[in-house]
Structures are given as C-alpha cells and as structure tokens.
Image (cartoon, rainbow, N blue to C red):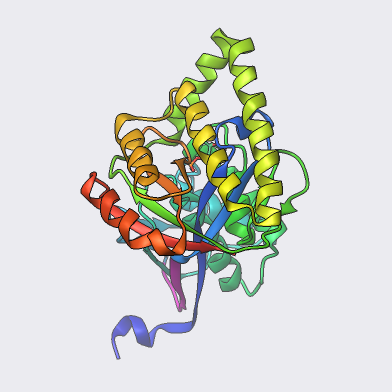
C-alpha cells in the first residue's frame, strides 16, 4: 500500500457522457430549438478520494496534462475546474475537502463532442459525493452552464443539458427540456476532421454576421427551425430517409452561416456518395466532427470511405 493509499478515508467514482448535436447548432443560440443526443459509450470518468489532509488536487492527464491544486479560499474562478468546485462548495456551504479527483476522458477536446461540459459534470458529481451529497441533475445543470460561459462566452445551454441529463432531447433556450421521442433506433457515424474547433470563434463570427445582415441570417435561422421541427416528427415516426434529407439541408444552411470548412464538406460529400442517408457537420463547426446517418448494411463501406477521405477517427453510435 502506498502512502497516498494509506491516507485515503473514502473513495468513489463519477462520470458523464459526450454528446452530438443532430440539428439546430448555432441557431439554438438565437432561440431556435435544437436536437442533441448523449454519447453514452464515450465518457469522462473521475475517480476521487478523500485524504486525511492536504489540498484538493484535480489531475487530468488526458486533457493536455492539466493539474491544479485547490486550497481553501481559492481565487482562480476563471479556471473551469475551480469554477465548478467553487459553485458546489457554495451551494452546500462547505469547505474544500482534502483529496484528489483524477480525470480520464475518451472524449477528444475541442471537437464538438462536449468534452468541456462532460468534464465539468463529472467533477461536479464527484465533489458533491465527496461532501456526502447526491446532487440533483437540475442543480448540476445550472452550475455546469455557468462553467460553459468560460468555454464558450454565450452558450445556449444545449451541451450541459444533454450531458447532465444523459437523454436525447429537443432543447430550446430558457424553456423546459423536451425528451425526444425515437420510434426506430438509428446509426450515426461520427467522423473527426482532426482539426480543433474552438466553438467561441465560430459563435462570434455568426454573431457578427447576424449583426451586419440580420434579415438574411434570421431567414436562415427560420429555415433551420422548420428543419428541426420536421426532424423531430421524422424521428418520432422513424422516417429515416426524411431525417437524412433534413441533415443534408441543414449542412447547406450551416455552410451559409460560414461555419463549415473544406474538410467537413469533403467528409459530408463522401458519406453521402458512399451510402449515408444524410450527413452534416455537428456542433460549432469549422473543424471538429461530421455526423452521417447510415443504414446498417452500409456502415463498414461508409466508414472505410470516410477514413480514405481524411477522417482521423470514425466512431459509431446508435441513437435510441
Ligand atoms: O460545443 P459545440 O462545438 O458542440 O457547440 C455547441 C453548439 C453551438 O450551438 C455552436 C453553441 C451553443 O452554445 O449552443
């Protein structure tokens, strides 16, 4: 037994999933509904332990080897790790426990798969457990949303909501969450361009476009809104051909918002040419991931073509 292990008073673990946005990214910031699903196989996991004495060390080797040591009366509330911890301590009127939180993550960072919100969610659950509480999703969601502001500036709240509740949702800013009704499970291939995509930059550029050309951009948001509503119906009745067509239309509108890129367009085109029912970028865009709706019999062929066309990694998820 190591010295550290001998000092442990209690320990446990917590986790949170990644996510993909199926429809409505960017427009969701302006009040349009959007659809997102959790990626339960792709997770952030944290192991925590309370020790007899010392600081609270948060160690995240998968996230560019980040490590921070939090002391009582910490001041760095612009650090996302410190911010989630501080909010939970304030909520329970507690002082910082001694111990550590070790984070491991399967979710690539800055790729539109919700890494930031998943890390905050898992740390939030862990710190509440360390204090002896099982925090409610409603409370945790509002705290993770605050941390999202550090990552994204003006987040809509979709990432934290789908990740904290770990449910397929139709989300509209400042409205109660609507669960998404799915009659027929469907397969989505997620292809990574390998290009980091800082969401706040794309969101900032869309804001400039909106301010300089409000009528045109509002028309695009209106079109996205009708796509999201049609997609909700198509998913509900299992009309996957329709869902695929709506994805293709969505991608064109996202191109008009300037948030696609050559690499994303190539992957979208490749997926459609090799048998996907539809494909689009997912999340902030510019880089990050593309998603394709693929019939069971075409999965291997589409995956192969995506890798040949330059995808750095292709994952499969079943939405159900
Ligand atoms: O975190 P990302 O890259 O999946 O982007 C979130 C979706 C946006 O609509 C682009 C931003 C937001 O806050 O909703």
> Residue 124 vs residue 272: left or right?
right
- Residue 1 visible in rendering: yes
Please name the residue shown 42% across and 35% down the image: 285
Quadrant housing residue 197: top left
Total labels: the figure holds: 0
Q: Residue at x 56, y 72 (%)?
A: 130
How far across and how far down the image is residue 140, in percent? Answer: 64, 57
Q: Position of residue 106 (x, y in %)?
A: 37, 63
Is 88 placed above or below 286 here?
Answer: below
In the image, 77 versus 216, the foreground residue is 216
Q: Quadrant of residue 59?
A: bottom left
In the rendered image, the residue lying farthest to the bottom is 1
Examine the rendering and report whether any part of residue 180 can be seen.
no
Looking at this view, is 161 or 245 the one in front?
A: 245
Most extreme residue toward the right is 176
Q: Who is closer to the viewer here, 294 or 58? A: 294
Compared to residue 253, the image places residue 81 above or below, namely below
Viewer-nearest residue: 238 or 84:
238
Instruction: Give yes or no for residue 52 being in the magenta stretch.
Output: yes
Q: Quadrant of the N terminus?
A: bottom left
Going 65% across and 44% down the picture, which residue do you hit?
231
Q: Position of residue 77 (x, y in %)?
A: 50, 44
| Residue in the image at 53% along x and 68% along y | 126
Say if the magenta span includes residue 127.
Answer: no
The kind of secondary structure the magenta stretch mainly shows is: strand
- Tell me the quarter of the image containing the C terminus: bottom right
Asked whether, in this view, residue 13 is left or right of residue 198, the answer is: right
Give the percent coordinates (x, y) of residue 226.
Answer: 68, 32
Query: Which region shows up in magenta?
Result: 44-54
């Amino acid at each position: 037994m190591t010295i550290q292990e001998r000092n442990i008073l209690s320990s446990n673990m917590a986790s949170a999933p990644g996510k993909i946005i199926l429809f409505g990214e960017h427009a969701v910031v302006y009040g349009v509904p959007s659809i997102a699903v959790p990626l339960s196989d792709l997770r952030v996991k944290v192991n925590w332990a309370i020790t007899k004495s010392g600081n609270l060390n948060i160690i995240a080797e998968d996230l560019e080897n980040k490590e921070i040591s939090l002391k009582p009366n910490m001041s760095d509330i612009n650090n996302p790790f410190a911010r989630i911890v501080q909010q939970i301590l304030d909520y329970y009127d507690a002082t910082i426990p001694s111990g550590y939180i070790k984070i491991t993550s399967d979710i690539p960072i800055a790729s539109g798969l919700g890494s930031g919100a998943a890390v905050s969610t898992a740390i939030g659950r862990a710190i509440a457990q360390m204090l002896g509480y099982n925090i409610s999703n409603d409370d945790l969601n509002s705290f993770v949303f605050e941390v999202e502001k550090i990552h994204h500036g003006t987040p809509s709240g979709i990432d934290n909501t789908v990740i904290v509740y770990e449910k397929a949702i139709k989300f509209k800013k400042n409205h109660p969450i609507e669960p998404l009704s799915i009659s027929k499970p469907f397969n989505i291939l997620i292809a990574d361009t390998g290009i980091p995509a800082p969401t706040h930059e794309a969101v900032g550029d869309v804001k400039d476009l909106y301010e300089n050309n409000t009528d045109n951009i509002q028309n695009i948001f209106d079109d996205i809104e009708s796509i999201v509503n049609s997609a909700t119906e198509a998913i509900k009745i299992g009309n996957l051909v329709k869902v695929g067509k709506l994805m293709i239309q969505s991608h064109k509108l996202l191109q008009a918002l300037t948030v696609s890129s050559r690499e994303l367009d190539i992957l979208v085109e490749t997926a459609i040419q090799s048998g996907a029912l539809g494909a689009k970028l997912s999340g902030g865009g510019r880089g990050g991931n593309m998603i394709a709706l693929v019939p069971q019999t075409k999965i291997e062929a589409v995956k192969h073509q995506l890798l040949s066309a330059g995808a750095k990694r292709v994952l499969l998820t079943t939405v159900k």
